[in-house]
Image (cartoon, grey):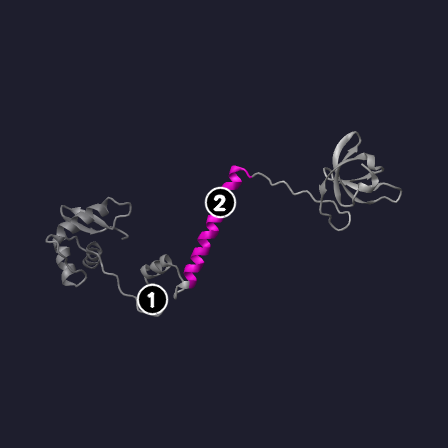
Amino acid sequence: MKKDQVQIGQLYAAKITDKIVPVRIDAEHKDGGWTATNTQTNRKVRIKTAQKLRNKIGSTPKDDGDTPTKRQPVKKKLSAAERKKLLAQHKADQENARLREEREASPEGMTASEAAMSKSAKPKRAKKPKDAPVKDKKLSLIGAAAQVLGKNKEPMSCKDMVNEVIAAGLWTPGDGKTPHATLYSAILRDLKSETPRFEKVDRGQFTLAKGA
């Protein structure tokens, strides 16, 4: 190739260190020849004579002066775990966006599910004032029987104890027809406990245990 055929900015096939590589002619060199760029390596080279150039390949756009073209970064291949994590994050972002739009469109500022949960929630009970009177707990039959025995100081049968607690208004009978049998069973269970309140003194006769 002749010197007058070489054009600045054109791309040529050039022989550099016994290899044919594509170069871009950037400018004329002050000592003769041209300053060029090896487009495969983006390195500056000097073309001393036109004989180093073979044929024209084409022209390439130049950056500011002799700035070499930057290589595009190679994209990293994601692993299966990374892809799964990104997919889960994408779904979560979509769901959050949907819920946000639903809240903005609702007059209550809630989603349909949140509104349903709010309506189904049980109202909180009002707190009782500290100075409110405390209601007396209803005595159980066996508790009332213990009070009767404590007053009488004498052994009593279950029937006598039931009649006494009803007469004293300590206990009100329910639907059961044999409250004395119910009391008898309760006292037998009490006698088997570690700290019984009752003591059997005779057949069908009971009194309060010592210290009860």
Judged left or right of residue 186, residue 55 is right
Residue furthest to the left in view is 177
Q: Quadrant of residue 10?
A: top right
Residue 173 within the magenta-colored segment of the rendering: no
Residue 188 falls left or right of residue 109: left
Q: Which labelled disc corresponds to residue 87?
A: 2
Specify the quadrant that holds the N terminus.
top right
Q: Nearer the viewer, residue 90 or 22?
A: 22
Instruction: Give neighbour class at mark 1: few <14, some 14-19, many 20+ (Cα, 10 Å).
Output: few
User: Under tag 1, what secondary structure?
Assistant: loop
> Looking at the rendered structure, which numbered label has been put on residue 193?
none
In the image, which is nearer the foreground, mark 2 or mark 1?
2
- Whether 168 is drawn above or below 16: the answer is below
Residue for badge 1: 126
Q: Residue 149 in the image: x percent, y percent? A: 19, 56
Q: Is residue 157 visible?
A: no
Numbered-mark total: 2
Q: Which residue is pictured at 23% across the width and 60% down the height?
A: 138
| x and y percentages locating residue 112 in the rendered image | 36, 59
Amino acid at the residue labelled 2: Leu
Q: Earlier in the sequence, mark 2 or mark 1?
A: 2
- CA–CA distance in space, label 2 to label 1: 47 Å
Magenta stretch contains residue 103: yes
Q: Give the image location of residue 95, x and y in percent.
A: 44, 52
| Residue at horizontal 44 percent and vertical 59 percent from the top | 101
The magenta region covers 78-104
Q: Which amino acid, mark 1?
A: Ala
Above or below residue 3? Residue 106 is below
Horizontal side of 113 relative to 197 (left or right) equals right
